Image (cartoon, rainbow, N blue to C red):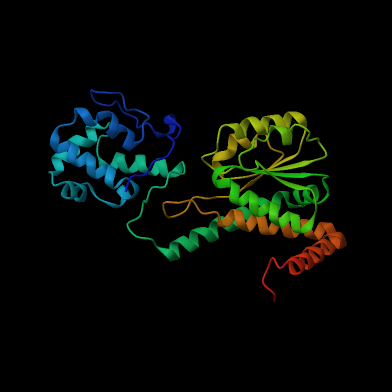
Amino acid sequence: MTTTAPSPTPAALTPDHASPAGPDVDGLRLDERVAARYADLPPQERRGADVLLEHFGDLATYSAAELAALAGVSKATMSRLFRSLGFDDFTQVREHLRRLRGHGLPVTLAAAPDLDAHADADGVAVRAAVAALAVHLDAVADLLAHAPRVVVVGLRNSYPVALHLRQQLMQVRPHVTLLPQPGQSWSEDVVDLSPQDAVVLVAFRRRPPGVRALAERLRAAGTPVVLLADPTARALAAHATWWVECPVQARGAFDSYAAASSVVAALADAVLARRGRTGEQRVTAIDSAYRTLGEVEAR
């Protein structure tokens, strides 16, 4: 299986050694290195390169000897291939894959899923995120309960979390907007935001570059920003009023948003409590509308 994705930041992925003669591959992903060097590889190394591409998504679960067997070549040939691609050995290939995974690229690092370990890792992440929320809960909940307008922003894999948060807040209070709308930009919606409004910026890793520009503009305008993001957002957090750090690193190939979902639930609960009777009346009115319009199953 071949995994394709935008190339992560080159400086974070470059091994600390010089690459052999041929096209410069420093800073490239493994699959990009294969593409750059493929035409110059001997036939046997090409067979090994084909196997690397075929198993790119779960490459770290194999040993160098197993890859050689899959390619029908010797271990020495695979070693030469790794050097041709700019690595000293397969250990550096594994480290390269771990770095890719650390940047959010779906790469399998374990031979088989360990569901107990997966659940344990999610539990640790949820506790860490809830602890991060607790530090700012009073201020953030007060802001989201009473600001005239709340804008929730989320792109790519952050969008589902932003959508869920918007839906929960809408149960509790009016004037909650989700950005961007499908096929639309956000400039028209953020240009009028004031210091009295509130923005929740959901920005998990593999963020589009425009997210930073948005955060900078909001800070310049004095609009309070609550940042929900993973640890890779430290630089972005400098432009936020509050940062709730939600780990997403999981045991498997894909990120887990269990911690983010838990934060959304806790935050919505806190906002409801601060809305008091007004919030409860809104919940009741919405439930009545659900039943009248037949939008949810009858109890």
Give above or below for 32 relative to 120: above
Seen at 83% across and 49% down, the residue is 146
On the rendered structure, is 146 left or right of 105?
right
Q: Quadrant of residue 153?
A: top right
Say which residue appears at 74% left-offset and 28% top-offset. Answer: 220
Pick out the residue farthest to the bottom: 299
Left/right placement of residue 92 relative to residue 211 reads left
Task: Where is residue 76? Give x, y as percent.
Answer: 14, 40
Q: 9 or 126, which lies in front?
A: 9
Nearer the observer, 151 or 119: 151
Q: How many marks?
A: 0
Rendering coords of residue 123 (x, y %): 54, 61
User: Residue, x 59% and y 58% (percent of image)?
Assistant: 127
Residue drawn at x 72%, y 33% is 188
Q: Nearer the viewer, residue 58 or 53?
A: 53
Residue extending furthest right? 277
Using the image, determine if residue 268 lies above or below residue 50.
below
Query: Which x, y percent locates residue 237?
Result: 64, 37
- Quarter holding the C terminus is bottom right
| In the rendered image, the vertical position of residue 202 relative to residue 40, given as above or below | below
Place of residue 212 in the rendered image (x, y in percent of width and height, measured from the top left): 61, 32
Q: Quadrant of residue 33?
A: top left
Left or right position of 38 against 1:
left
